[in-house]
Image (cartoon, rainbow, N blue to C red):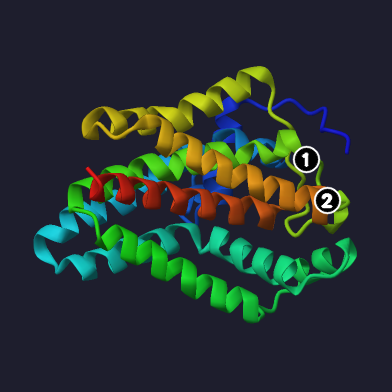
Amino acid sequence: MEETSVKTKWYQTLWAALIFFTRLPFWRIYQPPQASYKAVVEYWPLTGWLTGGAMAATLYFGSMVLPWAVAVIAAIAVRLLITGALHEDGLADFLDGFGGGGDRARILAIMKDSHIGTYGVLGLIIYMSLLGATLYSMTPMIAALAVLAADPFSKMVSSQLINMLPYARREEEAKNKTVYRKPSLAAGLSLTVQGLLPMAFMIWLTGISWYFVIAIPALVMYFLYLLMLRKIQGYTGDCCGAVCLLVELSVYLTVFIQFVNS
């Protein structure tokens, strides 16, 4: 797939990322050029600072006035409202496609279908149950720190799919009619900083073992990468969203296990 030759400013790409990955009305303030949307992944983790920050604030401050279980549900709802359940939709399509099986063409066709199937419904129920139960099992402070770290980190890790795999469809077949361009070296370094800074902050404050909380989510991403390589020989936007959520969940599970055993 050829990359666009149109050069865009960094702030245009950042604005495009905020518009693309959230449902907040940033588009009312500024409309970046269409070419900017090909590079939105370069600021994907930074949008996680926004969504993760909103979710963490709801967890921590909500726990002061609400029962902890209600605060956890409210925090998940806040993120769903901000993102428009963008990644959850991707996870459902991913599970339907790969769960339904068949050859490459059938998997891609199922993922493009707007209807949700049995695998998608059951997968979302299990995912949401694990997410809510894991956060509920932490203290408000640890849960808030974990969300602040996991959201950008999972987006950074998942963005590597674009470098590791080709896009699985033709550009005109893409749901949003946009194929992400591969990040440059400078963009890759920026992605790393965006994703690792909040994680380093959480590790520093909590004293959690950094090698587990980084290595295990990276392994989750790698195994999902192998699955995509074998089944569809590429990635789609749904795959990126699904990997992001599953990597993020693995961070929470790793944090929880370490604190339980500490």
Q: Is there a contact, CB below 8 Å, between mark 2 and mark 1?
A: yes
Residue at screen point 55% across, 50% down: 244
Q: Looking at the figure, which quarter contains the N terminus?
A: top right
Q: Looking at the figure, which quarter contains the C terminus?
A: top left
- Of residue 195 and residue 178, the one placed in the foreground of this image is 195
Q: Is residue 32 above or below residue 126?
A: above
Q: How many marks?
A: 2
Q: Return the mark for residue 32.
A: none
Crowdedness of circle 1 by 10 Å Cα count: few (<14), some, many (20+)?
some
Q: Measured from the top left, where is residue 192 in percent x and y?
A: 52, 26
Spatial CA distance of label 2 from label 1 is: 8 Å
Disc 1 on helix, strand or loop?
loop
Q: Is residue 219 above or below residue 114?
A: above
For this orientation, the residue located farthest to the left is 65
**Disc 2 residue type?**
Ala
Q: Measured from the top left, where is residue 196 in percent x and y?
A: 44, 29
Decide if residue 252 is on the left or right side of residue 260.
Answer: right
Disc 2 on helix, strand or loop?
loop
Q: Measured from the top left, where is residue 207 in percent x and y?
A: 24, 31
- Of residue 70 and residue 248, the one placed in the foreground of this image is 248
Kindly identify which residue carries mark 2: 168
Could one spot residue 94 in this view of the protein? yes
Residue at screen point 49% across, 45% down: 29
Kindly identify which residue carries mark 1: 165
**Disc 1 residue type?**
Leu
Crowdedness of circle 2 by 10 Å Cα count: few (<14), some, many (20+)?
many
Could one spot residue 15 in this view of the protein? no
- Of residue 162 and residue 230, the one placed in the foreground of this image is 230
Q: Is residue 120 above or below residue 253?
A: below
